[in-house]
Amino acid sequence: MGVLDYIWLGILSVFQGPELFSIFGLPVSVTLVMILCGFLLGIAVGATPGLAGPIAMAIALPILISVFGYTQEALLPVMGFLIGIMKGATIGGAVPAILFNTPGTPDAYMTTLDGYPMTQKGQAKKALRVAHFSSASGDTFSDIVLIVCAPFLALLVEAYLDLPEKTALLILSLSFIAAVVGGSPAKGLISTGLGLLAVYVATGEDFYPRLSLGTKQLSQGFPIATAVLGVLIIGSVFKGLEELWHEKRKSGGIAMIRDSGDQRLHFADIRRLLPFIARSAVIGTAIGALPGIGSTLAATLGYTIGKSRYQRRKAKDDPDFGTGVPEGIAATEAANSSVSGANLIPVLSLGIPGNAAAVFLILAAESIGGFNPGPSVFRFTADVVNPELVVAFGLFTAMLIANGLNWTIGGFFMRSMGIMTRIPKHILLPIVLLLTLTAIYVQETRMEAIWFALAFGVLGYLMRSLSISPLPFVIAFILGGKLEESARQAFAATGGDAFFLFTNPIALVFMLMSVGVIVFTAVKSKGAT
Amino acid sequence: MKHILKAGVVALGLALISSGVLAADWTPPGPIKMMIAFRAGGGADTQARLIAEALEAKLGWKFIPEQVTGKGGVNLLATLKDQPNDGTVIGMVVTESVGYNLAAAKAGITPANFTGIATTAGFQMGIVSLSSKGWNTFSDVVDAIKGGQEIRFGVMSPKLADLAYLLGKAQGVDFNIVPVKGGKAVMNGVNAGDLDIGFMAGIQAKGVASGDLVNLASGLSTPLKQTPDAPTLADLGVSYNSDGYFVFVGPAGMPADARQALAAAIAGVANDESSKAGGIIKKAFGGASTITGDALTTLLADGYKDASTLMDAAAE
């Protein structure tokens, strides 16, 4: 089995999976259909203000698992669906931003700056076309970087990092996430600490379920779905309901603006936009590859850098950024879309999730089993097939298929999604809440899971109210078990050396970097305020 | 060990004969909840789910598989013991869960809280390394340590950690004993070079057959089927062993007809090598070993009793 054989097997696993139906004798695999459905759902969800990709992924996951079961064959259809949602939501988010000045997803905020003015000028369709073109380009670029980089990074990690270094690397990524996400490192550390505390309930080597206070309810710990869905989804629903309470229902219809003028995207336009797209795609990919920094920052950076270049080069009478120039949309959308592929680099090569979407992909892999994202995936065994590697290449194939869909039908479907903005939040939020609780019960089938989820929901609400980002919590919850395990193993493997994190040069560098990241961001954010 | 196996075969025979009448009479009063103490998607989980699938197809019973993982099966046992004992709730663990792990957990639960239904397969527990290390048998590892090398020994349960410790003591060497989660993790660690040797309970079969891995010793009281020449733990001076089975249990006091019908059904599938479940059992463990009835009750009770002597020996 050479590398090419694995790639080929991965591609085949997508196209030749269990057959759903056939068109003119050509079998259509269930994975393909799932990618398509996920993609379309993703666009719709992204276009709905108040919903976002992770919410749809969270609700879909338990339902998909109960349909497909826990077998190896379930992995690609389920993860293909989730990848479809992830990609669809990215382009869908631009729709309400451009048409109604309300970003569908937070990372589309910068899109409103030039998108909505274009709509006001009667150029809505053109703006959507620019957004779609930039988004699809950025996304494709990012996926290619992922496919090239992830295996090599994984092989490097596997070849050079021993147990103590792996432990130090986990500590580094946690501190990086704590320091970078949200406003202040202190709040990030609180969020991370709470996540670790929650995951350490009832786990560990001892037979007594620690921190369970002797209760039976806590003796199995918190199921991962309750913590993740509770804090991320239910927490945001609670927060949304509160905001609704405050603002009262805004009445009045949305004014429709007639389209006027040429709506097509010409080759000359594309040539003008390409430098902006390329620069933003590189920025987005680089940011995506670092765990914890989301697509919102990528969009902001892409827009800001695009703006400064545009201002320097533009002719005197050209319109400014923020008054409805296509370059502004292109710079934002290429940046936020190119995050999604690169975000899977740390997931697949290190098992470290970088953002909420990646969290749900890991959750899917953990719930179904048989695929453990991390360096061991990319083991190119020659004589026996490494099934995880086949799945990895299957996932790459799924991503490229989603890209293909994005290029072909994505634009058309996206332009028809303006209607989603009309869904009122006071109906949407309770539905999301109910669906999430149902989804949790489907997976855990015990009543405690619901109570846990609601409690985590309250925690998520409180964190949002205090502007503490819940993402470090969730990532710490996911990595906590791994951190403890590898620390224990490193301690045992070094023959009980308590200073294993410092006696080894690479581990020591990682530890210094962890401290450095926190100190550096703390100083910087103090300077900024 | 042999006499237990023999007794098991006899008991199974009896169970099959008697349950021919009884099993026909007993049908589950509702869907059967099948708790599984292993990670979703792993080898043991697959085995349990395939058995459920085969029984659904064969007998028309309905199964609801559910993961209750953690604490080496103790979490599952703690949940299972208070469930209805009419045959509608069963759980799959390993004999070690009911033996060593219950004894170590000191949670007030004993094998008497459960009805043993049937084992499906016995471990082919070997001490395994990569063949590229150049070791052919366990004494090569001991020589390596005496030559100044540090050896990391991966174990997947506290009982195996005790055995590894006692093995080092008997051979006059120290291992760095590294606890990891599950046989798959031991194999990954050995393959990645994070571990030098490790206990594997059957997952190594493919790698040993292809020549990538080598069974340095048998962790059992008997030689391994795949590598009969490898020394057993007794040969290496350890009077304990890691003999164990995958086992289905129910809450205590299960009616005899339900117990026999379930046992016959599960053993039937495990022994049928043409079924998917029987097939993977054959591949990983060299064939099923199905112990039922009183022989199983004795096996579980003995495992619990012997655990404390092992713990005392390892604590010295």
Image (cartoon, grey):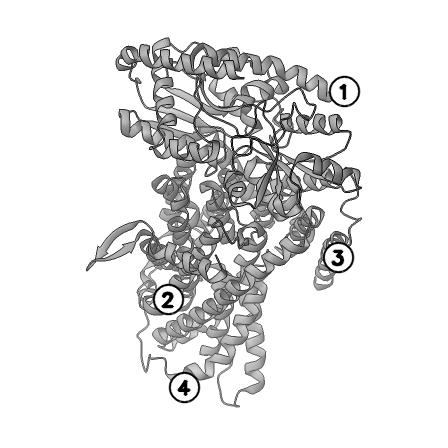
> Counting other residues with Cα less than 10 Å from the Cα at mark 2, is it few (<14), some (14-19), or many (20 or more)?
some
Which amino acid lies under the numbered mark 4 shown in the image of this protein? Ala
Which amino acid lies under the numbered mark 2 shown in the image of this protein? Gly
Badges 1 and 4, same chain: no
Quarter where residue B65 is shown: top left
**Residue where numbered disc 1 is placed:** B316
**Residue where numbered disc 4 is placed:** A268
Sooner in the amino-acid sequence: mark 4 or mark 2: 4
Of the two numbered discs 2 and 1 in the rendering, the one whose residue sits closer to the viewer: 1
Which amino acid lies under the numbered mark 1 shown in the image of this protein? Glu
Gap between marks 2 and 3 measured at Cα: 42 Å
> Counting other residues with Cα less than 10 Å from the Cα at mark 4, is it few (<14), some (14-19), or many (20 or more)?
few
Chain of the residue that carries numbered disc 3 in the rendered image: A
**Residue where numbered disc 3 is placed:** A516
* Disc 3 secondary structure class: helix
Gap between marks 3 and 4 measured at Cα: 47 Å
* Disc 1 secondary structure class: loop
Q: Is residue B187 visible?
A: yes
Label for residue A404? 2
Q: Do the residues bearing badges 3 and 1 touch, measured as CB atoms within 8 Å?
A: no
